[in-house]
Amino acid sequence: MNMVEFENTSALDIELAEKVAALLAADIQARGKASLVVSGGRTPMGFFHLLSQQLLDWSSVTVTLADERWVDADHQDSNEKLVRENLLINEAHQAQFISLKSAAENAVDAESECEQALASAGQFTVVILGMGDDGHTASLFPGTEALALGLDMNSGRTAIAVTPTAAPHQRMSMTLPRLLNAGQVIIHISGSSKQDVLLAAQNGDNAAELPIRAILGQQVAPLSVYWAK
């Protein structure tokens, strides 16, 4: 694991935007296309705006989400809304987007459809993950019925419905094997509380307790942690 520390979020956002743009550009040059998985929340907002201004062939880039709340795309809690309004703008407005939300009333009923949509992306160029104070990443929450399936590297599954025990809305989440099917995985966090959770995660191996441990302990994809004080 490569840990990169920053004095503030502004410095992190600048370097992360440049890093991701370089990875996308390299994949476009090598394969003719690239793909980016991002996460919702407030932490990536500054990064999204800076990345959206990077000069590259965005029409060859596919963007999707590590997880999505089962709400309409115009709902205030929608990760898709967040991405469309803060990342898929400026230069990045030409990027393709794969939505994890369908017209199905229940996320369980949409699992197969979501998996089919994600299959078209192939191996991701870069996956950027957040982390909650409870150690969850994507919507792989501790204490949920779906967690074991979500962390099973041999499940053959790429997306699963999740009902959090302590967070609003049903979710659709990529599974651990799908998140790790990437050229680069980056955990993006800020603040001392997140560093405390990260340190706790590093000092144990029970992923059911802190699911982020499944990302930290894997040997499948290159991993970096970008953390701002």
Image (spheres, rainbow, N blue to C red):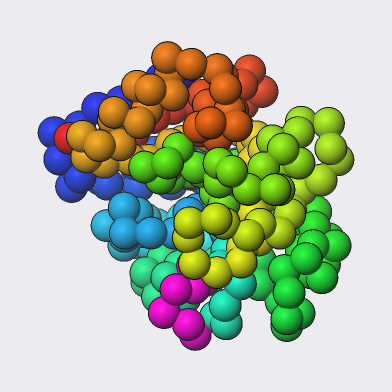
User: Which residue is at a point 49% across and 67% down the rendered structure image?
Assistant: 168
Pick the residue in front: 118 or 122.
118
Pick the residue in front: 85 or 79.
79
Tell me if residue 34 can be seen: no
Tell me if residue 203 can be seen: yes
Pick the residue in front: 84 or 158.
158
Establish if 90 lies above or below 205. below
The quarter of the image holding the C terminus is top left
Quarter of the image holding residue 114? bottom right
Relative to 111, 135 lies left or right = left
User: Which residue is at a point 49% across and 42% down the rendered structure image?
Assistant: 136
Relative to 14, 105 lies left or right = right
Establish if 202 lies above or below 191. above
User: Which residue is at a point 35% across and 22% down the rendered structure image?
Assistant: 199
Establish if 216 lies above or below 80. above
Residue that extends furthest to the left in the rendered view of this protein: 7
Relative to 135, 160 lies left or right = right
Q: How many marks?
A: 0
User: Which residue is at a point 41% across and 79% down the rendered structure image?
Assistant: 76
- Residue range (magenta): 74-80
Coordinates of residue 228 in the picture (x, y in percent) = 22, 37
Quarter of the image holding residue 117? bottom right
Establish if 116 lies above or below 9. below
Coordinates of residue 104 in the picture (x, y in percent) = 76, 79
Coordinates of residue 31 in the picture (x, y in percent) = 69, 43
For the stretch drawn in magenta, what is the main secondary structure? Answer: loop
Is residue 138 located in the magenta-colored stretch of the structure?
A: no
Quarter of the image holding residue 71? bottom right
Relative to 158, 176 lies left or right = left
Coordinates of residue 89 in the picture (x, y in percent) = 40, 73
